[in-house]
Amino acid sequence: MNHKAETFIIPEYELEITASRAGGPGGQHVNKASTRITVRWNVRNTLALTDEEKIRIEGKLQSQITANGDLIVSYGGSRSQQHNKEFAIQELTKKIRKALFVPKKRLKTKVSKGAKEARLEAKARHSEIKKLRSQKFE
C-alpha cells in the first residue's frame, strides 16, 4: 500500500453516525433496541483529502456514493450497538483505503543478452538433434 492509504485519518466531526432498528432474527430485542449503525461521510466536503484523492475515491466508489457525495456504510449484525459502530467505521475506512491505493506502474524489462544467446544455443542444439535423427545410414 502507498503511504497515504495507510495513514489516512477521518476526522470524527465529519462522520454522521445514526442508530436504527435492525431487522433479522433476535425476537423482541430487535423490535425494541436500535442496534443497526449507519455511518455517513461526505467525500466532497472533507478536509482530510486532496482534490485528486477525492476524484479517485469518487471514481472507484461511484456506485456506493450518493448524489450529494455521501459514502454510507450500515451494519447491524450484532446485538451490541457499540460493536456495530466499530465494525461500520472499520468497513468505511477499509473502503476508503482500498480506493486510495495507487498500484505501481509496471516497468518494461528487456531480455538480457546472455538469456537471448542461451535460448538461441538451445534452439541450435535441438535443431542438430533433429537433423541427426533424419539422416539415413548405409
Image (cartoon, rainbow, N blue to C red):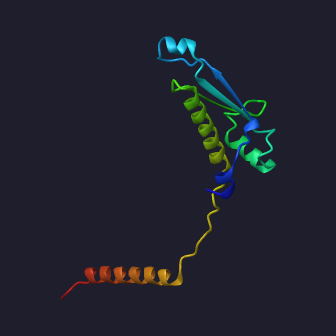
In the image, farthest residue toward the bottom: 138
Nearest the viewer among 1 and 62 is 1
| Relative horizontal placement of residue 124, taking residue 108 as reference (left or right) | left
Which residue is found at the position 77% from the left and 46% from the top? 48
Residue 3 percent coordinates (x, y): 67, 58
Q: Residue 84 in the image: x percent, y percent?
A: 57, 30
Q: Considering only vertical position in the picture, is 133 above or below 88?
A: below
Give the residue at the far left of this rendering. Answer: 138
Q: Which image quarter: residue 32?
A: top right
Q: Toward which corner of the image does residue 92 lie, by quadrant?
A: top right
State the residue at coordinates (51%, 26%). Answer: 78
Q: Which quadrant of the rendered structure holds the C terminus?
A: bottom left
Residue at horizontal 72 percent and vertical 38 percent from the top: 12
Q: Measured from the top left, where is residue 103 in percent x and y?
A: 63, 56
* In the foreground, 67 or 44: 44
- Between 112 and 50, the one lying in front of the other is 50
User: Vertical placement of 118 versus 77: above or below?
Assistant: below
From the viewer's perspective, is residue 47 above or below residue 42?
Answer: below
Q: Position of residue 17 (x, y in %)?
A: 69, 29
Up/down of 10 relative to 111, above or below: above
